[in-house]
Image: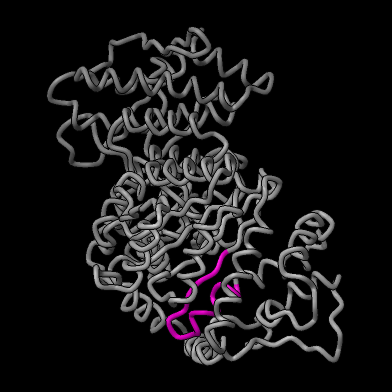
Amino acid sequence: ITLKEWLQKVQIGPVDMNVRLKAAMAISKTLSDFHDGGVVYYNCLTPENIILAPVEGEYTATFIDLSGALMGMFENQLKDLDLQNLGLLLNQIFQAKCQTGHRAGAGHDKGGGRWQEETKEGQDHEYGVRKRGKLPSLGEGIPLYLGTLISALLDTSASMESKVLYESAKDVYLDLKNMAANSNCHLRKTELDESTIKSRLRLRGDMFYGRQVQVSMLLHLFQSSVVVGDQPLMATIAGYPGTGKSALVNQIKKPLADLNGCFIEGKFDKHARPDAALASALNSFFGKILESNTGNKFMSMKWRIHDVIGSGSNNIMFEFLPNLQKWMADGCVPADNPTKYPSGVKGIGSSHRLKFMLCKLIGAIACRAHPLVLFLDDLQWADDMTLDIIRMMMTDPEIRHFLFLGCYRDNEVNLSHPLKAKLKAIQKQGISLISIKVGPIEKECVNTLVSEALSMPPSLCRPLSDVVHSKTGGIILFVLRFLASLNDDGDLWFSMSNRRWVYNLEGIKLKEIHDDVVSHMTQHMKSLSKTMQMGLKFASCLGPRFGSTVLE
């Protein structure tokens, strides 16, 4: 049937979006094949001149009436007219309207059934570039990704600061194909939220792209140590600051949660006591159990902990882990026995005892019913005692279903760094240590990130993502901050008239970016308001953790 008849059927009854996508892909593919052969269909690209035929769940599109097709010298000048007519067809397909559309600077020849192009005064040939005018309405309910695609085909504005337009039908086809393959992502956003309307770009901090090799290594290690559980395993993840080492570790949280597993995470701080990192991580873990009121779920764990460390009020573990004491006492702590963090472990005997009991505590938490992953970040600032505890945990034959993950900045750890010596010592004891290297993400991954952040087809955001990758080197932290700064500076904004994100590519090319995290963040903080800067100064005096109400 012709596309006109197909559109009439679509108007009568609802048609699934995926069916519309297949029809749009077929038309785009045929037009791409025409252009690859040096043929421009020109004003013949109308619903009456396209035949759609279903083939094995897909569509094929055949163009008829080639009387107006052009070849040779007109190809480069008129190819954009085909793209604009393609945009009109897609607009009808996805809005289920079969009436003839109206576009800027164009009229319809009722006699011949073809689109005829108005030309500018003084042009020396009959085929001209369209005048600027109002775009056909894209209608409500069309996904932002699809609306951006159609808008880029229909837009003929020559005075735009940013010309985010299509240059080939093949790019349109590939973007539609990408939309069909990732429909759950690209078809879900149909309404403009408040931040988009205000042209505020929202970037999630947990965005994760690429790293297929590293993820495979981590998941294989997870399966071997946590699921099989014969012996504990250890992996270190090294990379430059901002490359996404922690984001990589977060990829195992979901499979761990599916197994009712436990995830304990901590972070060493250069300006805080390093030996408090592990204690803080464990105390936070037991605090979450108290807050979630899921104590009964971990009743067997509580009994195992009771067996290995006891429950006496003078237990040295409770001095480090007040939330553990509350949990063991069912939330009740005697008033005459307030918990406090000790100023330090005094004496060799006390130090050995504490390390021994921490290992037993880890062994009591980890089991087949609740496998455990312990993650410590910034190992380059770890203290000798914590590294010794890690070594003891990895060599304890009673600890099973346990995986230790540690991240460190490889630019701060050379061969003479104490961490290297400790890791070698662990390996000499027969412990399997897996090293995972995390570097910048590839150019294509940056393009995918930008595409999803802006709900923009990959072909349209590639010029932007290429510049972003070039300036940031693919460091994920820099990529996110650079995009945010472009939005703040007005070089990346949401156009309500076109209903899509646009960008000033030439202005972005002139931007400069610092090549290290400290300089980059310092420059960003200087751009904040004076009130925000004052708040950051106060926050820096309060330490790494404090309640949000303090600054209110």
Q: Residue at x 46, y 56 (%)?
A: 495
Residue 202: tell me if it is visible: no
Q: How many marks?
A: 0
Q: Is residue 296 above or below residue 522?
A: above
14 lies left or right of 423: right
Q: Residue 366 at x, y = what percent? A: 65, 54
Of residue 75 and residue 541, the one placed in the foreground of this image is 541
Asked which quadrant contains residue 524, the reply is: bottom left
Asked which quadrant contains residue 9, the reply is: top right
Residue 358: tell me if it is visible: yes
Of residue 260 and residue 351, the one placed in the foreground of this image is 351
Q: Residue at x 26, y 68 (%)?
A: 511
Q: Residue 496 at x, y = what percent? A: 50, 55
Of residue 195 and residue 255, the one placed in the foreground of this image is 255
Asked which quadrant contains residue 19, the reply is: top right
Q: Residue 358 at x, y = what percent? A: 61, 69
Q: Residue at x 71, y 46 (%)?
A: 369
Colouring mode (rainbow / by chain / secondary structure / one colour)? one colour
- Give the magenta range: 265-280
Q: Is residue 254 above or below residue 477?
A: above
Q: Residue 28 at x, y = what percent? A: 38, 24
Q: Residue furthest left?
A: 73
Quadrant of the image for the C terminus?
bottom right
Q: Is residue 277 magenta?
A: yes
Q: Is residue 328 above or below residue 538?
A: above
Of residue 107 and residue 255, the one placed in the foreground of this image is 255
Q: Is residue 548 magenta?
A: no
Q: Residue at x 52, y 28 (%)?
A: 92
